[in-house]
Image (tube, rainbow, N blue to C red):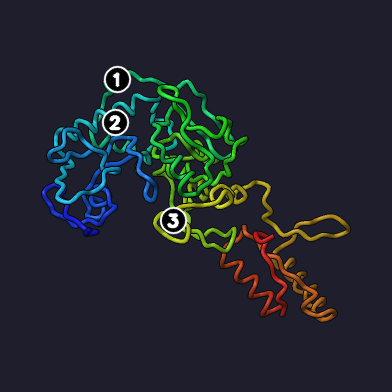
């Protein structure tokens, strides 16, 4: 049996390989099909029904993210029937909670908002049905159930990408919600606070607590860098406003992490702007610290290291580096230890 076939999308004929969905073929060929619940690299759910398309000879519209491509299939992605269905589903999602954009952290970076604008939805015909569940706030992740559209992307990310299996769907019908085991708060659950769920949430239901009310998406300057906490080399974006790192996101589609980060990489940046962070060298005299200039401090360190090296040899000196400085600075530290001091006694705090 051939592993390839032909599929026609919007009048264009394409070759597909076995296992590809209609959405995969369309995306590969640059044909736009809107999605909300679809998450690359995970099992499709067809939950949001935004990616509906029309198949020639089929009575019902199908979710292109979950429908496999079939030989000689004829697909239309933008017929009036498809557009009406997408708009209706968007209205239902907008009515499913309290989607107030003015103070939402996802404003300007929200797929639901983006699609509502694209399809010109100015009013919603259905009554709003806000959730009965309270917003949960902890020091790292805020869950706002009133904004959750139950797309399931966070569940897929947790179970299939990070494989932490900390969250899933809970309850039924109008009581449905995303829950941890036993429906406990995040802080009391199996969650390891990697923040993968925050990164993939298409709305403002999951946000970084640290970044709340510190700026909207268009106010941030994104700086790509490499995480310093360990040697994996995860790629990340620092979202910076007024010279302050407000939040961190992983760089998707780029190795080695492909958007994923650990709890330290995603949330461990508060030290950068901590008011208690030392900004001036301190020298201990008579059991007390006093402020000193950089020249005085460096001269003192150089003098003492030179004396120790002369008296007891370079291997009596050990250098400990830090995950809270840049990779370039860590490189200089080990170069200093080996080439200047003459010792291989160098280590890094993230390895301890």
Residue sitting farthest toward the right: 286
Disc 3 versus disc 2: distance between alpha carbons?
29 Å
Image point 62% across, 35% down: which residue? 188
Q: Measured from the top left, where is residue 101 in percent x and y?
A: 38, 31
Q: Measured from the top left, where is residue 150 in percent x and y?
A: 40, 32
First in sequence: mark 3 vs mark 2? 2
- Front-lying residue, 132 or 266: 132
Look at the image and tell me in which quarter the C terminus lies: bottom right
Look at the image and tell me in which quarter the N terminus lies: bottom left
Secondary structure at badge 1 equals loop
Image point 18% across, 42% down: which residue? 77
Label 2 with label 1: CB-CB less than 8 Å: no
Give residue 148's mark: none
Dot 2: within a 10 Å radius of its alpha carbon, few (fewer than 14), some, or many (20 or more) residues?
many
- Front-lying residue, 127 or 155: 155
First in sequence: mark 1 vs mark 3? 1
Q: Label 1 belongs to which residue?
A: 126
143 up-or-down from 246: above or below: above
Q: Label 3 belongs to which residue?
A: 258
Disc 1 versus disc 3: distance between alpha carbons?
39 Å
Image point 48% across, 38% down: which residue? 207
Disc 2 versus disc 1: distance between alpha carbons?
11 Å
347 up-or-down from 17: above or below: below
Tell me which corner region of the image, top left, top right, bottom left or bottom right, holds residue 149: top left
Q: Label 2 belongs to which residue?
A: 90
Q: Measured from the top left, where is residue 261 in percent x and y?
A: 51, 52
- Front-lying residue, 235 or 286: 235
- Front-lying residue, 208 or 197: 197
């Amino acid at each position: 049996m051939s592993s390839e076939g032909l599929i026609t999308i919007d009048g264009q004929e394409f070759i597909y390989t076995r296992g590809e969905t209609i959405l995969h073929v369309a995306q590969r060929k640059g044909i736009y099909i809107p999605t909300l619940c679809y998450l690359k690299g995970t099992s499709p759910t067809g939950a949001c029904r935004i990616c509906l398309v029309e198949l020639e000879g089929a009575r019902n519209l199908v979710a292109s993210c979950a429908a496999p491509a079939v030989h000689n299939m004829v697909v239309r992605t933008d017929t009036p029937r498809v557009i009406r269905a997408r708009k209706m589903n968007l209205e239902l999602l907008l009515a499913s909670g309290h989607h107030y954009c003015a103070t939402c952290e996802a404003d300007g970076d929200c797929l639901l908002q983006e699609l509502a604008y694209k399809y010109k939805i100015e009013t919603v015909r259905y009554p709003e049905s806000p959730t009965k569940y309270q917003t949960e706030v902890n020091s790292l992740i805020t869950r706002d159930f009133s904004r959750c559209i139950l797309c399931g992307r966070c569940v897929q990310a947790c179970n299939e990408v990070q494989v932490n299996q900390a969250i899933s769907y809970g309850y039924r019908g109008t009581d449905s919600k995303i829950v941890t085991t036993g429906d406990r708060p995040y802080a009391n659950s199996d969650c390891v606070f990697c923040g993968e769920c925050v990164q993939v949430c298409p709305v403002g239901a999951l946000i970084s607590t640290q970044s709340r009310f510190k700026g909207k998406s268009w106010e941030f300057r994104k700086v790509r860098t490499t995480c310093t906490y360990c040697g994996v080399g995860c790629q990340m974006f620092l979202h910076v406003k007024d010279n302050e790192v407000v939040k961190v996101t992983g760089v998707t589609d780029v190795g080695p992490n492909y958007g994923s980060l650990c709890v330290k990489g995603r949330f461990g940046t508060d030290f950068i702007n901590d008011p208690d962070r030392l900004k001036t060298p301190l020298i201990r005299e008579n059991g007390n610290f006093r402020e000193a200039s950089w020249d005085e401090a460096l001269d003192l360190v150089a003098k003492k290291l030179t004396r120790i090296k002369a008296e007891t040899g370079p291997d009596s000196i050990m250098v400990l580096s830090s995950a809270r400085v840049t990779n370039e600075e860590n490189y200089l530290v080990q170069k200093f230890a080996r080439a200047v001091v003459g010792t291989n006694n160098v280590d890094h705090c993230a390895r301890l």
